[in-house]
C-alpha cells in the first residue's frame, strides 16, 4: 500500500483541502495524528467516541512497525501480530527454495516450533515520546546552511546514544523532526529482532488482482499474514493486545486506523512541488519503467527466475503506479498555484507582525533559489548516494560494511547519519542476517544501475569515469557479482574485523566501493551544502512562521512514526458513479477468470461451496493514511480490531500533497473474511483458537 492519485476535475475541492493542509488544522477526517497530540475533543464531537489517554496507551502498546516499511497489530497474548500479506511476501520468498515455493503455495504451521524466522526483519513497539526540541535547536542555532546538516546529525546521534546505549539489544531510539524542524521528539521503541512467520496465504489469494487491481476498488484480497514476536528464543508475552472481533463492519461505522505512515509532502512549497513535477518524478518514472521491462524479461526465462523476480517486480509496479499518480496530481491545472496562494496568505500574516517578519525573513525565496541546484544534482545524488545499486543486495552489503568500518573509527557525533552508536545494532542486523542472494538478479540490477549512471550523467562526467572508467556496465556487473558477500560468514568476518579487515579484503565489491566511495561522499557533501542544508534552514523558518500564526493544532507530515487517524466506513461518489464500501465473497467468484492475476488458489476453489457468499471481504473507510500504513489495524469504537488496511483507492494517489475527504479512501480486509478463510479454506484451528482467546 502506498500513496495515491487524484483524477482531473477536482481542482476546486482540492483547493480547499490544500489550503487547509498548508495553513491550519485539518477538516473532516483529515490527519495522521501523533499519540501525544491526538484531537480527542474533535473525535468526541463528531463521532461520540471517547479516546482518552488510557485508550491511546493501550493501542500504542498493541501496535508495532516492521522494518520492511509496514505496520502491525498485536492480536494475542503470545506475541502474535497481524499485518498484510505483501508485507511478509519477502520473508516467504527468503524462506523458499526451488523445491518449496511459499509465495505460490502459502505458509502454514501446526505448532509454534514450525514457525520460521524472517531474515532481516525487525519489529518496534513505541514505548515513549520525549521532547528534545530545545537540545537540537540549541545545537543548530546560528549554523550556516553548510554546517546545519552535520550539526543536526551530530546532536541527534548524541541524544539517541544517551537514551539507548545501555539497552541497545532491546531498545531502538530515534530523534524525529516534525513541522519542518519546529519540533524534535525522541521516540523510544522496544525492538524485536526475532520475528517469525506463522501464516501467509497463497499469492493468488493475498495479491488477487495483481497490478491491475492495485489502488483500485472493488477488491477481493486476503491481504493478510500472521507473524510472531520472539525474545530469547520464546514467544513474547503481550497481555496488552487488541481483541479480535470477527463481526463485519457496517456502513458509517466510526473507525480508527493506527500505524506508521512513511512520508507525506503536505508542507512543501510550490517551488519544491514544481521541481518534483518537472524533474524528479519524470526521471524516476522513466527509470522504473525500463527496470520493470528488464525484470519481466528475466522472469520469462523460467519458473525459478519468475519466482525470484516476482517480489522485486511487485514493488516496482507499485512504486510506478504511485508516483505516476503523484505526477498526475501535480499536473492538474491550478494544483500548485493553490499551494502558492496558501503560502501567500501565510506570508501576509507574517508581514503584518514586524517582529515576526524580522525573525523569519524570506525563507520562501531561499527555497526557490535552491531549486536550480536541486534539479541539477538530483540525478547524481539519487544514482550514486541515495539509492545506489538499484536494489542489489550485494552492493548494499559492500557499502554498509565499508562505511561502517570507516565511520566507527570516528567519534560518534561526527559520523554519517545512520552510523551512530545507537543505530549500529540495526545496521549490524541488516548486514549479518542470512538471506538468499540471487546472482542472476544481482547482475541485472547492477548492469541497469551502471548503465543509467553512464546514460544519465554522460560518459565524460567525473562520476561516470569513477564508477565505470572504460569498462562496460555488462562486463563490470559480471565481475562484481563474483563477490562472496552473499555468504553471511564472510560479512560477519568483515564486520567484526572492522577497518583492517575491510582494507585487507580482496572481494571485488569491497574493492569497488573503497575505490568509488570518495566520489559518492563528495556527491553527498555537495547535496547537503547546496540543497539539503539550505532547504532545512529555510523550512525551519517557514515552520516557525506557521506555528506563530496557526499554532500546533495541525498534524505533522508523516515520518514513519506511529500515528492515529479517525474516520468512518464509507464509500464514495465520483462523476455520478457511487462505489459502495463493501465487497463480498460472492464478488470474488464473479471476478475470477482462471488466468493470472485473477486466478484463484486451488484451496479457494475447493472451498467455494462452503464459504458464505454474503461475508464482507474488503471494505473502504475515509481514514487519512499513507504508504507505511500497510497492515495497520482498523479499530472500532470499543478498541477491537475489525480489519487491516492494505491499500487506497485510485482517487487518493495525490494524498502525499493534500487530503480530500470526499473521495480519498483506504482499503482494508475484514476480520470477518479472515476468520472464515482460516476456518473454511485453511482449516487452521490452532491460529483461530489463539485469535479467539481472551
Image (tube, rainbow, N blue to C red):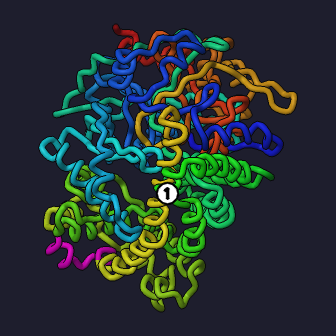
**Taking 225 as reference, is 653 above or below it?**
below
Split into 4 quadrants, where in the image is the C terminus?
A: top left
Q: Determine whether, in the image, residue 46 is placed left or right of residue 462.
A: right
**Residue 433 in view (yes/no):** no
Residue 488 screen position, x and y as percent: 25, 58
Residue to which mark 1 is pinned: 358
User: Which residue is at the far right?
Assistant: 576
Choose top left, top right, bottom left or bottom right for residue 132.
top left
Residue at the spot 65% in from the left edge and 30% down from the top edge: 665
**Can the viewer see residue 693 in this picture?**
yes
Residue 332 screen position, x and y as percent: 78, 51
Mark 1 crowdedness (10 Å alpha carbons): few <14, some 14-19, many ≥20: few
Picture coordinates of residue 538, whole percent (x, y):
49, 59
Identified at 27% across, 49% down, the residue is: 135
Q: Nearer the viewer, residue 242 or 596?
A: 242
Out of 610 and 435, give the one closest to the viewer.
435
How many marks the image carries: the answer is: 1
Query: Looking at the figure, which quarter contains the N terminus?
Result: top right
Q: Is residue 332 magenta?
A: no
Decide: is 453 above or below 18: below
Which residue is outermost to the front?
Answer: 354
- Residue 121 coordinates in the image, percent (x, y): 34, 43
Query: In the displayed structure, does residue 320 sit left or right of residue 173?
Result: right
Choose top left, top right, bottom left or bottom right for residue 664.
top right
Assess whether residue 507 is covered by the magenta stretch.
yes
Look at 52% across and 40% down and name the residue there.
104
Q: Is residue 432 above or below residue 2?
A: below
Instruction: Specify the segment rendered in magenta.
Output: 499-510
Q: Secondary structure at mark 1?
A: helix
Amino acid at each position: 500500500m502506498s500513496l495515491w492519485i487524484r483524477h482531473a476535475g477536482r481542482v476546486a475541492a482540492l483547493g480547499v483541502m490544500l489550503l487547509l493542509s498548508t495553513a491550519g488544522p485539518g477538516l473532516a477526517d483529515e490527519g495522521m495524528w501523533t499519540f501525544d497530540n491526538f484531537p480527542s475533543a474533535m473525535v468526541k464531537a463528531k463521532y461520540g467516541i471517547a479516546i482518552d489517554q488510557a485508550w491511546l496507551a493501550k493501542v500504542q502498546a498493541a501496535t508495532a512497525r516492521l522494518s520492511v516499511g509496514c505496520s502491525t497489530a498485536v492480536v494475542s497474548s503470545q506475541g502474535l501480530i497481524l499485518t498484510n500479506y505483501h508485507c511478509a511476501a519477502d520473508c516467504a520468498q527468503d524462506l523458499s527454495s526451488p523445491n518449496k515455493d511459499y509465495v505460490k503455495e502459502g505458509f502454514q504451521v501446526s505448532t509454534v516450533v514450525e514457525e520460521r524466522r524472517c531474515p532481516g526483519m525487525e519489529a518496534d513497539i513505541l514505548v515513549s515520546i520525549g521532547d528534545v526540541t530545545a537540545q537540537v535547536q540549541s545545537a543548530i542555532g546560528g549554523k550556516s546552511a553548510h554546517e546545519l546538516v552535520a550539526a543536526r546529525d551530530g546532536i541527534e546521534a548524541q541524544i539517541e546514544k544517551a537514551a539507548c546505549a545501555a539497552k541497545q539489544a532491546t531498545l531502538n531510539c530515534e530523534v524525529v523532526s516534525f513541522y519542518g524542524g519546529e519540533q524534535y521528539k525522541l521516540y523510544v521503541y522496544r525492538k524485536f529482532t526475532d520475528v517469525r512467520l506463522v501464516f501467509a496465504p497463497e499469492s493468488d489469494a493475498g495479491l488477487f488482482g495483481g497490478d491491475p487491481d492495485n489502488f483500485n476498488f472493488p477488491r477481493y484480497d486476503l491481504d493478510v499474514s500472521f507473524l510472531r514476536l520472539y525474545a530469547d528464543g520464546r514467544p513474547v508475552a503481550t497481555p496488552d493486545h487488541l481483541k479480535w472481533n470477527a463481526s463485519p463492519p457496517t456502513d458509517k461505522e466510526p473507525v480508527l486506523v493506527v500505524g506508521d505512515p512513511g512520508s507525506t509532502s503536505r508542507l512543501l512549497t510550490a517551488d519544491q512541488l514544481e521541481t518534483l513535477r518537472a524533474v524528479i518524478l519524470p526521471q524516476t518514472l522513466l527509470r522504473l519503467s525500463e527496470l520493470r521491462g528488464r525484470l519481466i524479461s528475466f522472469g520469462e526465462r523460467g519458473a525459478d527466475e519468475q519466482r525470484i523476480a516476482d517480489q522485486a517486480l511487485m514493488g516496482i509496479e507499485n512504486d510506478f503506479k504511485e508516483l505516476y499518480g503523484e505526477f498526475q496530481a501535480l499536473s492538474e491545472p491550478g494544483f500548485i498555484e493553490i499551494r502558492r496562494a496558501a503560502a501567500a496568505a501565510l506570508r501576509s500574516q507574517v508581514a503584518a507582525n514586524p517582529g515576526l517578519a524580522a525573525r523569519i525573513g524570506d525563507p520562501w525565496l531561499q527555497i526557490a533559489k535552491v531549486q536550480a541546484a536541486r534539479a541539477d544534482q538530483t540525478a547524481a545524488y539519487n544514482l550514486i548516494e541515495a539509492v545506489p545499486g538499484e536494489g542489489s543486495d550485494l552492493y548494499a552489503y559492500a557499502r554498509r560494511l565499508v562505511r561502517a568500518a570507516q565511520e566507527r573509527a570516528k567519534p560518534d557525533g561526527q559520523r554519517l547519519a545512520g552510523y551512530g552508536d545507537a543505530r549500529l545494532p540495526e545496521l549490524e542486523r541488516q548486514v549479518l542476517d542470512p538471506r538468499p542472494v540471487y546472482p542472476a538478479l544481482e547482475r541485472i540490477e547492477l548492469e541497469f544501475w551502471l548503465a543509467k549512471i553512464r546514460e544519465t550523467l554522460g560518459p565524460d562526467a567525473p562520476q561516470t569515469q569513477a564508477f565505470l572508467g572504460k569498462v562496460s556496465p555488462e562486463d563490470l556487473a559480471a565481475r562484481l557479482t563474483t563477490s562472496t558477500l552473499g555468504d553471511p560468514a564472510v560479512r560477519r568476518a568483515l564486520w567484526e574485523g572492522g577497518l583492517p579487515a575491510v582494507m585487507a579484503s580482496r572481494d571485488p565489491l569491497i574493492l569497488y566501493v573503497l575505490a568509488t566511495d570518495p566520489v559518492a561522499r563528495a556527491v553527498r557533501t555537495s547535496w547537503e551544502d547546496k540543497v539539503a542544508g539550505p532547504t532545512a534552514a529555510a523550512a525551519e523558518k517557514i515552520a516557525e512562521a506557521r506555528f506563530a500564526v496557526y499554532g500546533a493544532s495541525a498534524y505533522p507530515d508523516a515520518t514513519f512514526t506511529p500515528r492515529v487517524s479517525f474516520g468512518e466506513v464509507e464509500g464514495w461518489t465520483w462523476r455520478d458513479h457511487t462505489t459502495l464500501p463493501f465487497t463480498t465473497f460472492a464478488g470474488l467468484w464473479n471476478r475470477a477468470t482462471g488466468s493470472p492475476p485473477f486466478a484463484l488458489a486451488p484451496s479457494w476453489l475447493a472451498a467455494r461451496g462452503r464459504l458464505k457468499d454474503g461475508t464482507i471481504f474488503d471494505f473502504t473507510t475515509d481514514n487519512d493514511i499513507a504508504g507505511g500504513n500497510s497492515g495497520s489495524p482498523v479499530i472500532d469504537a470499543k478498541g477491537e480490531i475489525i480489519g487491516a488496511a492494505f491499500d487506497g483507492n485510485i482517487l487518493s494517489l495525490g494524498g502525499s500533497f493534500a487530503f480530500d475527504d470526499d473521495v480519498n479512501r483506504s482499503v482494508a480486509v475484514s476480520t470477518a473474511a479472515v476468520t472464515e478463510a482460516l476456518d473454511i479454506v485453511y482449516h487452521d484451528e490452532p491460529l483461530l483458537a489463539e485469535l479467539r482467546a481472551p
